[in-house]
Image (cartoon, coloured by chain):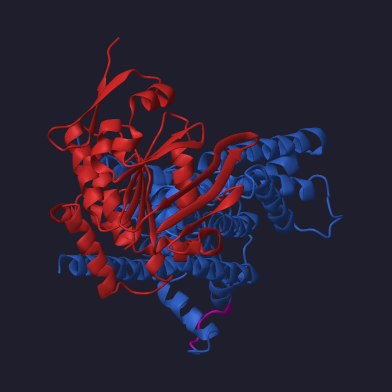
Amino acid sequence: MIDAGQRDGGAFGLALLLTLSAVTLALAVAVAAAIGDYSISLRTVFLAVTNRLGLSTAEIPRIEESVVWDLRLSRALVAALAGAGLAISGAILQALLRNALAEPFVLGVSAGASTGAVAVIVLGLGGGALSLPLGAFGGAFAAFALVALLSNGATSGPNHTILAGVAASQLFNALTSYIVTTSGNAQQARDVMFWLLGSFGGVRWPDFQLLLVVIIVCFGICIYMARALDAFTFGDEDAAALGIPVARIRLVMFAVTALLTATIVSMVGAIGFVGLVVPHAARYVIGPLHLRLIPACAVTGAVFMVSADIVSRVIVAQQTIPIGVVTALVGVPFFAIILYRARPQS
Amino acid sequence: MSIVAENLVWGVRRRAIVSDVSLAVAPGETLGLIGPNGSGKSSLLRLLAGLRRPDSGQVSVLGQDVSKVSRRALSRQVAFVQQNAATDTNVSVLDVVRLGRTPHRSALSGWTAEDQAAVTTALDRVDMSARKAQAWQTLSGGERQRVHIARALAQTPRVLFLDEPTNHLDIHHQIEILRLVRDLDLTSVVALHDLNLAAMFCDRIVVLNGGRVIASGAPADVITVPLLREVFRIEAGISTSPFHSRPHIHFMTG
């Protein structure tokens, strides 16, 4: 039967994409661990990892092993997870809001995170007990709560929710600017802005572990909800007619994307473009069904982000470009090709 | 009775849209809902399909109170076709019809022979089997409506609700869609604007005005000159068609 053939074709395509992406991801992570101001051979990277995992006892310089394991590998893996999480969030929000321009920050999460960050850094909220990531996470969730409130617990329909997100973003951006201009000094403001553009500089293993748990939980929920997300193709009422408890699913899924995004933003800043572009690219290759799209987004987003991190470290010698700048610079030409190839045939 | 509605009341804020509507639909019957714009046709249809909750009154479908059945259980027996449901997503005809199996599948279950049979039958029923691989975006209005009906049929429902399924279609496609609905072995409730088509294809007609049922019965009993004047504010003459022996309305120009 043709139907079965088509389905197998899709499954085969997904298996191929996942395998290719996994190999590419492993390579990209290895390269990310090898390059830098202090260049390390790929062989040493491999041995350093197996040493630390207790799989080998190779004689390699302690300093190289430490650089690979303690600094670069954790950074690369956090980048991979962050890319995966942002891409998944983008895919879900594009489906639920039925808007091609939806991305992880559409619910005001990044604006809220920046307000939370400046409240901690500039105002000294929490008297030193709160770290920047905690402040950012709190701000992000405050913004999401406001959006949920403004859109009646996400029952008011896509456009209403998007407008609520715009309003929350404006409010929190204004609060950030107000705090920075009235009480901050220039250096603190610059720190916050730089942080917000995105950087994997400070991340270590505990960040990876936390993010891994969050991603696994959220990924599981998304896969479980994948069929329900498909039912939103023709809108909320149509999904309801197909037996989907629309209001509950929307609220749960919005909360999942907010949790993913807030965790990532509070760790590495608001890295744009990944959550917008990767879902479109993945959909173009793998089709719109979420049971395939979500895993595809996860691996593609991971590869994209690790690659972007490598580029950010090598493009200018002795200097790291903010990751958000790179994702846009690398992503836009790539996206342009997809837009061109997917243009409506007249 | 397949569908029984008792004293349905529904409104937005203080404005009543549906006031005290009661009706019953027999198994296999095709019921037409007619009435002027804003008469409450679409709202009543959604109340009957369980997509909205009435402020008071109750609806039972196939003997079950719809407010007490889960959305999922209800949608295995009741399908709803919206008017002009659209999407920007790049889906194929087959993808759309397969969505109709959503209420029958659990979150991670595979695609069963039963699912496949339902989809194949539904595509055949609307004569779209040969075009199942075609992209949704490339279909004409009539074809899209047929695919929506196929998706509803893939739910294997026993009751079908359609909200102005012939809107924006040319006359050939209007007749094609209504003939399809009439010939289905289902209980169906169709909101319609075209009075002549309603008279031709429906077993029974319910006339709504201002959220109330003004008349209900066989087309020949319901469609009368005084009713058209009162409800639709038009002058018309009515004759029995020599071709299909249903009432035919002749609208007066002046």
Q: Position of residue A194 (x, y in %)?
A: 63, 45
Residue extending furthest toward the top: B254
Chain A display color: blue
Query: Residue A163's image quarter?
Result: top right
Q: Is residue A69 left or right of residue A88?
A: right
Q: Is residue B225 visible?
A: yes
The spot of residue A26 in percent (x, y) is: 41, 71
- The residue drawn where x is 41% and y is 48% is A277
Give, as a single range, the part of the protein colored magenta. Answer: A58-62
Tell me if B254 is positioned left or right of A150 in this view.
left
Quadrant occupied by the N terminus of chain A: bottom left
- Residue visible at 43% across and 47% down? A235
Q: Residue furthest right?
A: A127
Q: Nearer the viewer, residue B53 or A339?
A: B53
Q: Is residue B87 visible?
A: no
Q: Colour of chain B?
A: red
Provide the major secondary structure of the magenta segment: loop
Q: Position of residue A32 (x, y in %)?
A: 46, 64
Lateral position of residue A47 relative to residue A265, left or right: left
Residue B11 counted in the magenta span:
no
Most foreground residue, A266 or B187: B187
Q: Is residue A336 left or right of residue A115?
A: left
Q: Position of residue B119 (x, y in %)?
A: 25, 63
Say which of B229 and A100 sits in front.
Answer: B229
Above or below, A261 against A102 in this view is below
- What count of labels does the image hold? 0
Which quadrant is home to the C terminus of chain A? top left
Judge by depth and name the residue closer to the eye, B53 or A51: B53
